[in-house]
Amino acid sequence: MIDVKVNPPSGTLVLNRPERCNALSREMIQGLIRGLDDLHQQKNVRGVIVTGSGSHFCTGLDVHQLKETGEQPDADRQQQWLEDIELVHELLLKMLQFPKPLIAAVDGMASGSGLALMLACDLVVASHRATVELPAARLGVVSGLAIPLLTFRAGASTAARIVLGGDRITASEAKSLGMVHHVVEADQIWVRSQHWVEEIAGGAAEALQLSKRLLNETVGESLQTWLSVAAAAAATSLTTEAASEGLQAFTEKRQPKFP
């Protein structure tokens, strides 16, 4: 479900589950981690593009898989949810610490953990029809891991608008808010991303690596702490009655009736 492609000087990780709008299963998250490890080792890859197949980038965690976990006995359920959130946490940290620039090539929706995936990339190219949102509250859960990244990239005011206000943001507005850097036609997002990697490849790899560390680990010193706290909040939210009802309602295609 994760395709790894190499077109020097870029490598591309493709979320290839279009029938589920590229919703992240634990197998896909593990595939992204392995794909980053593979592309890290390839010297002819100077930047990595993360994109989705079909009409959407990524609509977040696989709600059906979360609901299946919720049907397990209490101890097993809580342990699996904790492991799932920690796996996402591991992926996002790996992306922030990845030594090569990451470019998100976004078409359609980037929501929930899909938005976190986009924001963990250093640069973003989006199509005109791309949108970003955090609908977790409508499922009775918390978009814990997306919130610190959203605040880091766009500021607390924009984060409050999306997290609490529930606004869906268009690509053009996301660009004005600093979440997106270039907006192009849908059939040009990978091409524009590839051109960007070609431009990046003209710089020294070591200088780029050190620059990224300065941005994400020095200027963003508190980000990793925020993500650790956020992972705990996200895992805890999955154990609530509201989450149980929200996930059930989603799979049954009805409005939730929160306690």
Image: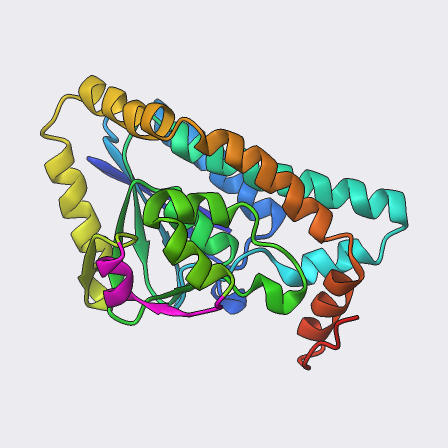
Query: Residue 219 placed where, x, y %?
Result: 32, 28
Q: Is residue 239 magenta?
A: no
In depth, the one of 110 and 233 nearer the eye is 233
The picture places residue 46, in percent across and down from the top left corner, at 23, 30
Which residue is located at x 71 percent, y 66 percent?
Answer: 247
Does 112 appear above or below 153?
below
Locate residue 39, reporting x and y percent: 36, 31
Q: Residue at x 65, y 58 (%)?
A: 141
In magenta, the rendered stretch is 165-177
Q: How is the image coloured?
A: rainbow
Q: Is residue 225 left or right of residue 214?
A: right
Residue 12: image location, x then y, percent? 32, 44
What residue is at 66 percent from the left and 39 percent from the top?
Answer: 232
Q: Is residue 39 left or right of residue 250?
A: left
Does the magenta run of residues contain 176? yes
Q: Is residue 42 visible?
A: no
From this view, report whether residue 151 is shown above or below residue 215: below
| Residue found farthest to the bottom | 254
Q: Is residue 114 visible?
A: yes
Total residue callouts = 0
Left or right, 197 with respect to 117, comes to left
At 38% from the left and 55% from the top, the residue drawn is 157
